[in-house]
Amino acid sequence: MRPPLPDTTPIRPANDPAALDEAAAILRAGGCVAVPTETVYGLACDASNAEAVAGVYEAKGRPRFNPLIAHVRDLAHAERLVDLPETGRRLAEAFWPGPLTIVAPKRPDAPVSDLAAAGLDTLAVRAPASPAMAALIAAAGAPLAAPSANRSGAVSPTRAEHVAESLSGRIHLILDGGPCAVGVESTIVAVTGDPVRLLRPGGTPRAEIERVCGHALSFAAGASDRPEAPGQLTSHYAPRSAVRMNASAPEPDEAFLAFGEQRSVNAVRVMNLSPRGDLAEAAANLFSGLRALDGAAPCIAVAPIPDYGLGEAINDRLRRASARKD
Ligand code: TXA
Ligand code: MG
């Protein structure tokens, strides 16, 4: 039996050992805990416990066919879950702990419930660079399944307050580790065949991965809403306001998400992702910026963002946010 849900979910400091003990006990009992990672906040549960995983889907209101990432301590831990080809191992060695998720053939004896893997014979694994998450994986004694800690279809949370806004009363505990350093989700690559394929741009830039693979990654932006990565529905990152990309200037009735040095503009509300034009800073501010502008105007105009480095992930998220939801 899962622990009962509180009316209001408590928020505790992620660096408090007593809070980590409490979180680990909840996880071992089959509950779910929001945990900061370097990318976004994750909603963690014991990946081997199907009932716990069901609780995560329920809290998020997420379609059940969406497979979850199994968070592991390190490469050796990952190799108990998946069969990694040589390139997969090289990628893990180069980027873990960090914002790279690797999809590989699932081992038949992997301690991961079919519900977490959505019945697929592949599994996504990642070793996150977050002390709280690492401590919890060790304390739970199991890989932790953790989707982003938001209601299905909403933007990912990069602060504990974002998690509380959408999930308070629906999950057992929130650990507050302050704002996430990276701010966009992990890059997802599949090593299930040759060559390695990019399934989702994210916190590890494509060029760095290509350097380690020794070849270019294939990625068709339009193809990502077809179910190879079943969660990659085009309208996945959806604020309530419409989003207009590549706007050199906002209309007076729009909100404006700026990037780089800012001329004075006439808009309902303005946020700047990075006044100094730094893509890493912009990624870290992306989701909180969208949130701050969401609902302030019928449309959020977004300044052009360069499409290299972390800009590729930022533009991918913005395209999804701007996709019409019918
Ligand atoms: O940075 C991140 O990756 C965050 C933090 C919490 O680790 N997690 C995250 O999880 O973004 P989520 O569930 O919001 O997104 C994971 C994506 C989903 O779109 C899912 O479809 C895809 O990974 N995925 C999971 N397993 C897969 C598999 N076996 N094959 C292809 N895609 C998979
Ligand atoms: Mg998500």
Image: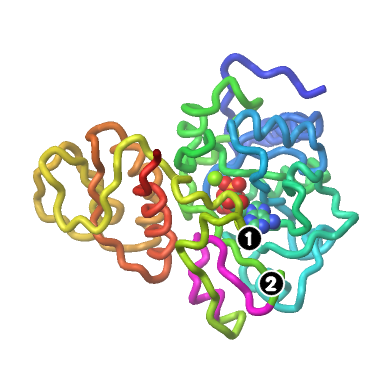
Spot occupied by residue 132 in the image (x, y as percentages of width and height): 65, 44
Mark 1 Cβ and ligand 1 under 8 Å apart: yes
Q: Which of the 4 image quarters holds residue 115?
A: top right
Q: Nearer the viewer, residue 228 or 39?
A: 228
Q: Is residue 6 above or below residue 123?
A: above
Q: Element at badge 2? A: helix
* Label drawn at residue 101: 1
Q: Is residue 26 above or below residue 64?
A: above
Mark 2: few, some, or many residues within 10 Å (few <14, many ≥20)?
few
Q: How many marks?
A: 2
The residue sitting at 51% across, 55% down in the picture is: 225
Q: Element at badge 1? A: strand
Q: Earlier in the sequence, mark 1 or mark 2?
A: 2
The residue sitting at 57% across, 63% down in the picture is: 199
Q: Which residue is mark 2?
A: 93
The residue sitting at 40% across, 61% down in the picture is: 280
Residue 207 within the magenta-colored segment of the rendering: yes
Q: How is the image coloured?
A: rainbow
Spot occupied by residue 278 in the image (x, y as percentages of width and height): 32, 63
The extreme right residue here reads: 109
Mark 2 Cβ and ligand 1 under 8 Å apart: no
Q: Quadrant of ligand 2?
A: top right
Instruction: Name which residue type carries label 2.
Output: Glu
Q: Which residues are magenta?
A: 194-210
Instruction: Please state if 275 lies on the left or on the right of 191 as rendered.
Output: left
Mark 1: few, some, or many residues within 10 Å (few <14, many ≥20)?
many
The residue sitting at 48% across, 55% down in the picture is: 182
Residue 116 within the magenta-colored segment of the rendering: no
Q: Does residue 128 appear in the picture of this structure? A: no
Circles 1 and 2 in contact, beta carbons < 8 Å: no
Instruction: Name which residue type carries label 1.
Output: Thr
